[in-house]
Image (tube, grey):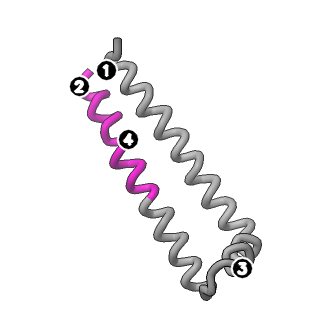
């Protein structure tokens, strides 16, 4: 049987996993920027500035989704329970 505590725990683990993936993405982008850019520039003709903007926007969108779909419901269930 699924309880509020179970759902709350699942949301917390999902948030932690997603934040870990976001951190991995950011660190990889910061410390291996040239390698990542070279890999992508083989497939797509894109200037470095646009490449950076796309990744920054993607990371921002991912972070907003984590807050919206994992952390906000976790907080709501924490308040209710």
Cα–Cα span, label 1 and label 2: 9 Å
Cα–Cα span, label 2 and label 3: 51 Å
Tell me, yes or no, whether the highlighted magenta stretch contains residue 74: yes
The residue indicated by pointer 2 is 80
Cα–Cα span, label 3 and label 4: 37 Å
Query: In the rendered structure, are the residues bearing label 1 and label 2 in contact, judged by CB atoms less than 8 Å apart?
Result: yes
The residue indicated by pointer 3 is 42
Q: Residue at x 61, y 60 (%)?
A: 26
Q: Residue at x 69, y 61 (%)?
A: 28
The residue indicated by pointer 1 is 4
Point out the tag, 1 or 2, that comes first from the N-terminus: 1
Badge 4 density bin: few <14, some 14–19, many ≥20, Cα 10 Å = some
Badge 1 density bin: few <14, some 14–19, many ≥20, Cα 10 Å = few
Q: Which SS class for mark 2?
A: helix
Label number found at residue 71: 4
Label number found at residue 33: none
Q: Is residue 39 above or below residue 10?
A: below
Point out the tag, 3 or 4, that comes first from the N-terminus: 3
Point out the tag, 2 or 3, that comes first from the N-terminus: 3
Give the x, y percent position of residue 81. 27, 21
Query: In the rendered structure, are the residues bearing label 4 and label 1 in contact, judged by CB atoms less than 8 Å apart?
Result: no
Left or right for 78, reference 33: left
Tell me, yes or no, whether the highlighted magenta stretch contains residue 37: no
Give the x, y percent position of residue 62. 45, 57
Residue numbers of the magenta segment: 62-81
Of marks 4 and 1, the one in the foreground: 1
- Asked which quadrant contains residue 3, the reply is top left
Give the x, y percent position of residue 1. 34, 11
């Amino acid at each position: 049987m699924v309880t509020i505590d179970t759902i709350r725990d699942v949301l917390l683990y999902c948030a932690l996993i997603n934040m870990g993936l976001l951190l991995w993405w950011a660190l990889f982008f910061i410390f291996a920027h040239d390698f990542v850019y070279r890999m992508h520039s083989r497939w797509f003709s894109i200037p470095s500035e646009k490449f950076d903007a796309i990744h920054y926007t993607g990371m921002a969108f991912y972070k907003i989704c984590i807050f919206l779909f994992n952390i906000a419901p976790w907080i709501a269930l924490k308040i209710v329970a």
